[in-house]
Image: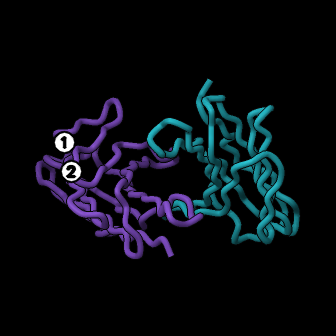
Chain colours: A cyan, B purple
Amino acid sequence: QKEVEQNSGPLSVPEGAIASLNCTYSDRGSQSFFWYRQYSGKSPELIMSIYSNGDKEDGRFTAQLNKASQYVSLLIRDSQPSDSATYLCALEWANAGNMLTFGGGTRLMVKP
Amino acid sequence: GAVVSQHPSWVICKSGTSVKIECRSLDFQATTMFWYRQFPKQSLMLMATSNEGSKATYEQGVEKDKFLINHASLTLSTLTVTSAHPEDSSFYICSARDTGSNYGYTFGSGTRLTVV
């Protein structure tokens, strides 16, 4: 099993719908979890971080963490065409020198 | 806050030449910076961890003599691709974390390297 897994997509949703992006991970005492958005040809930009079980909301974005089931998800409400990008799940492993391990990314397409 | 500046944004070089990429933390000090490489339609792969004042830590399979990393100050790390070959053509991205904030890891804008 890969350390961090994401469905590569593409995930296609209509404009205004909720986009749900999922990420599963191997349990190695993971500590911090991040969602990044990457547009084609650009570097990743941080959307949200989450550290404890439950939901964390920021505007149209909600991150959900379930450590028992080893998954972290990102919900995007009222999806816009400008949300079309690749979304990267990243984990900072405990005792791993404060470095990030990335999933393969999920490509999201929001259709007008 | 937590801005990371990376230069150049793109570079084209001839096979056999060397290319230096700079990564600067503009508003915070970074004792550690990270260098990633990303091939088309693939995710980011960590190449090395750059440590201020000491040797970089390279990931398995990354040639340290080919990818020279220098982290001479708390705000600057450089990656030099030596004797570049076409297979080194990729998108190189640096990252740093402002441990004094909740910004998480911030990425530079990336450098598109094309070796011809």
Task: State the residue in front, B4 or B30.
Answer: B30
Q: Which residue is mark 2?
A: B81
Quadrant location of the N terminus of chain A? top right
- Is label 2 in a helix, a strand or a loop? strand
Q: Is residue A41 visible?
A: no
* Residue A105 shown left or right of residue B70 in the figure: right
Callouts 2 and 1 in the same chain = yes
Q: Residue at x 65, y 54 (%)?
A: A35
Q: Residue at x 80, y 63 (%)?
A: A57
Task: State the residue in front, B86 or B22.
Answer: B22
Q: CA distance from mark 2 to mark 1?
A: 6 Å
The chain letter for the residue carrying disc 1 is B
- Is label 1 in a helix, a strand or a loop? loop
The picture quadrant where one finds residue B73 is bottom left
* Residue kind at label 1, given as amino acid type: Lys
Pinpoint residue A87: horizontal percent, then vertical percent. 64, 54
Contact flag, marks 2 and 1 (Cβ < 8 Å): yes
* Residue A100 shown left or right of residue A2 in the figure: left
| Mark 2 crowdedness (10 Å alpha carbons): few <14, some 14-19, many ≥20 | many
Q: Residue at x 66, y 34 (%)?
A: A25
Q: Which residue is mark 1?
A: B66
Q: Earlier in the sequence, mark 2 or mark 1?
A: 1
* Residue B80 shown left or right of residue A41 in the figure: left
The picture quadrant where one finds residue A112 is bottom right
Pinpoint residue B112: horizontal percent, then vertical percent. 35, 60
Residue A78 versus residue A68 in the image, above or below:
below
* Residue kind at label 2, given as amino acid type: Val
Task: State the residue in front, A64 or B101.
Answer: B101
The chain letter for the residue carrying disc 2 is B
